[in-house]
Image: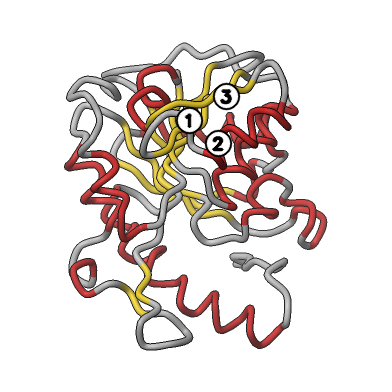
């Protein structure tokens, strides 16, 4: 059984994606003292370069492959429709042996709101497809059911007292992710709901259209759900 010996004090972190989620995650990790490389389709992306200028000396940017190779842990913060295309540009061994946090959702907005799940992911989750695309990495699906601001500061909702779903095939990888999210963003041990292997991503991804409806109903994305027993 593979185990991971990480020092969470200072780590090199790769972020695939330059959008709202990628920037929120990257900026929060810089604030915690980590070294973060933001990856995009090609090095020199205008958005990534602007983030580096703002984030300071521990921030850097490059291609998706640069970020994947550089990070001890890697976050996938991409539009779900294009996530597999991005992974196809990586060196075959870029993510071998690494924990990869999958924050993606395969949403189809072409029929209006709320979005649907993209048809090709209605019988198998994007999380499962990502794990299959990088079989020697340890994919953990999480954070995809909350707003980017809540991802990095769960206290924005009910003083942090709400649930965060986690799934993946490797128990030690999930455990390390829980510790990392607690240390980096302030999630509590009580927040985590482990749903089992990566197939559970079918359910957490399918929840997101309902999440969008709840956003419309409440008028704010700063909400979450809490499992009570």
Tell me the number on the disc at residue 48.
2
The answer to whether the residues at label 1 and label 2 have Cβ atoms under 8 Å apart is: yes
Tell me the distance, in whole angstroms, between the alpha carbons under discs 1 and 2: 7 Å
| Residue 86, horizontal then vertical, whole percent | 29, 42
| Residue 55, horizontal then vertical, whole percent | 71, 29
Describe residue 87's horizontal placement relative to residue 69 as left or right.
Answer: left
Q: Estimate how packed mark 3 is, as few (under 14), some (14 to 19) or many (20 or more) residues with alpha carbons within 10 Å.
A: many
In the structure shown, which secondary structural element does the residue marked by tag 3 occupy? strand
Residue drawn 24% across the image and 51% down it: 128
Q: Estimate how packed mark 2 is, as few (under 14), some (14 to 19) or many (20 or more) residues with alpha carbons within 10 Å.
A: many
Query: Would you name the residue on which mark 3 appears?
Result: 36
In the structure shown, which secondary structural element does the residue marked by tag 1 occupy? loop
Describe residue 64's horizontal placement relative to residue 94 as left or right.
Answer: right
Q: Estimate how packed mark 1 is, as few (under 14), some (14 to 19) or many (20 or more) residues with alpha carbons within 10 Å.
A: some
Tell me the distance, in whole angstroms, between the alpha carbons under discs 3 and 1: 15 Å
- Vertical comparison of 27 with 37: above or below: below
Which one is in front, 22 or 132?
A: 22
Residue drawn 69% across the image and 16% down it: 57
- Vertical comparison of 10 with 191: above or below: above
Badge 2 or badge 3: first in the primary sequence: 3
| Residue 114, horizontal then vertical, whole percent | 47, 84
């Amino acid at each position: 059984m593979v185990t991971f010996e990480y020092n969470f004090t200072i780590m090199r972190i790769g972020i695939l994606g330059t959008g709202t989620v990628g920037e929120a995650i990257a900026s929060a990790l810089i604030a915690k003292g980590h070294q973060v490389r933001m990856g995009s389709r090609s090095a020199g992306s205008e958005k990534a370069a602007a983030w580096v200028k703002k984030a300071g000396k521990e921030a850097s940017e490059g291609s998706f492959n640069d970020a994947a190779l550089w990070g001890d842990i890697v976050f996938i913060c991409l539009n779900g429709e294009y996530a597999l295309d991005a992974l196809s540009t990586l060196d075959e061994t870029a993510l071998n042996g690494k924990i990869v946090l999958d924050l993606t959702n395969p949403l189809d907005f072409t029929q209006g709101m709320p979005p649907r799940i993209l048809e090709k992911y209605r019988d198998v989750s994007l999380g499962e497809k990502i794990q299959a695309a990088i079989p020697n990495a340890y994919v953990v699906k999480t954070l995809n059911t909350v707003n980017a601001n809540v991802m990095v500061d769960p206290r924005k909702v009910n003083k942090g007292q709400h649930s965060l779903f986690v799934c993946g095939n490797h128990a030690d990888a999930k455990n390390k992710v829980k510790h990392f999210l607690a240390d980096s963003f302030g999630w509590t041990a009580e927040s985590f709901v482990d749903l089992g292997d990566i197939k559970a991503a079918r359910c957490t991804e399918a929840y997101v259209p309902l999440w969008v409806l709840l956003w419309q109903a409440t008028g704010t994305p700063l909400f979450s759900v809490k499992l009570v027993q």
